[in-house]
Every structure is written in structure tokens, then in C-alpha cells.
Amino acid sequence: DARVTQTPRHKVTEMGQEVTMRCQPILGHNTVFWYRQTMMQGLELLAYFRNRAPLDDSGMPKDRFSAEMPDATLATLKIQPSEPRDSAVYFCASGLVMGVNTGELFFGEGSRLTVL
Amino acid sequence: KNQVEQSPQSLIILEGKNCTLQCNYTVSPFSNLRWYKQDTGRGPVSLTIMTFSENTKSNGRYTATLDADTKQSSLHITASQLSDSASYICVVRTGGGNKLTFGTGTQLKVEL
């Protein structure tokens, strides 16, 4: 049963600490997305990779956030230093792009981050 | 600016009743529209996709409609069950750039 796997599921940390979230996309998918979800804002796009290359990270605060895909089986989202306003649920999603049509996104279970 | 607005923001219905969720969008050019269901503490899962030429599509007790002229979509849930309690998110894709615009969702609660 193919699924997107995210770790950790829950993370509580103190302000100023580094946080790294990891995602294993579904094998064969060529796009990976990082989203942040809060009650107030809903789902916000942070970063988008296609074939491991970053295509859009305009939604990501560049001074403290970074996203990478060191290989096709791993995507990472790092926050350094973390701040209380970063508290949210972070979702990774993967999908398959063919031509100009992009298919369904498959979401992981999310990483709930609390920064004290 | 591309926007997707959903209504109502939240809804409570009794088990067995029907309900309809609305999605209005200003995304252009339009490629497709998906409805996702997000259970509490889980990631969103796709329910159905609507393309420009489709007016109605069903998935079990879920029926989605699309009016591309008025840029409106609805999700109708028939004979609701407790397991339908979730957030329902409307997502519109733009053509060409493959950008997604998310609605903020409708929180549905089905009660006994």
C-alpha cells in the first residue's frame, strides 16, 4: 500500500532550536510539495519540487526555512532557528506530473510542530 | 489574484441527513478542481476531480458538481454518516503553470 511517510509525527521544541522534518514520497512520483496548515490560514504552499529540482519556494520564509531533496526517496524541511509562530502542522505531498496535467496529490499524515 | 472561497465555514448535521458544501473560485485559467476530505489529525485525501467539461461526478455518497461559467462547485453528501465528519477542502488548479489554490475548507460534523 503506497503512501507518503512523514517523520516525526509530533515535535515539541523550544524557540531558537533547529527542526528537521522528513518525507518519503511515493515511489515513482516526480513531484513533492511541502505545505503548512494552521487553523487561520488553511493549507499554505511552502515548497514544490519536480524531479528533485526546486520549482517554487516563494511561500517559504527564506531566512529560516530551507527545503531539499537529497535523493528521490527523501525530502527535508528545515527550520533554523524556530519561532513560536512556526507552530503548525506540516504536510508533505507527492504526485505524478505527466505533460501539462498534474494528477492527484497524496498527502502524508503530517508533522505537528509546537515551538514554545 | 487566484482565490478559492468555501462556504459554510462549518456545518453540523444529524446522521442520515444530506448536505451541500459550496466552493467559488476566481482561478484563471482553469484546469481542474478537486475536493479533498481531511479527517482530524490526518492528511487530505482526494474524493473527486472535476475538469472543465464535466458537470457532475459521483463517488459513492459524494456527488460533485461544477459550473465553469459561474465558477462554482458543490459537494453533496447523501445520507450522512458519523465518519463523514471531517474538513472538506476545495482545490483548484490553474492551467499552464500547474499552480494549486486551496480553499480554507468546510468543517463538517455529523451527530447522532
Image (tube, coloured by chain):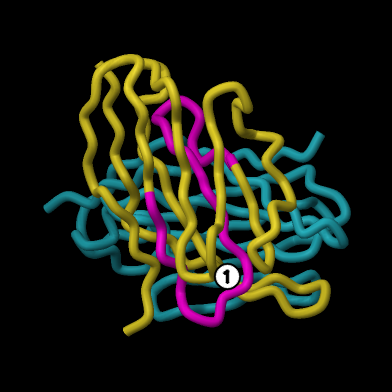
The residue lying at 43 percent from left, 49 percent from top is A91
Q: What percent of the width, then of the height, locates residue A116? A: 25, 16
Q: Residue reaching furthest left? A: B112
Q: Is residue A25 magenta?
A: yes
**Place of residue A19 in the rendered image (x, y in percent of width and height, measured from the top left):** 35, 33
- Image-quadrant location for residue A52: bottom right
Is residue B41 toward the left or the right of residue A94 in the image? left
Q: How many marks?
A: 1
Say left or right for B67 vs B77: right
Q: Is residue A52 above or below residue A1?
A: above
Q: Quadrant of residue B57?
A: bottom right
Label 1 resides on the chain identified as: A
* Chain B as rendered: colour: cyan
> Going 65% across and 34% down the picture, which residue do you hit?
A59
Residues in magenta?
Answer: A22-46
Q: Position of residue A47 (x, y in %)?
A: 61, 45
Q: Is most of the magenta stretch helix, strand or loop?
A: strand
Determine the image quadrant of residue A40.
top left
Residue furthest front as drawn: A70
Residue B42 visible here? yes
Residue identifier under label 1: A95
Looking at numbered disc 1 in the image, what kind of residue is underneath it? Gly
Is residue B16 among what the camera can see?
A: no
Chain letter, colour yellow in render: A
Q: Would you say residue A85 sits in the magenta stretch?
A: no
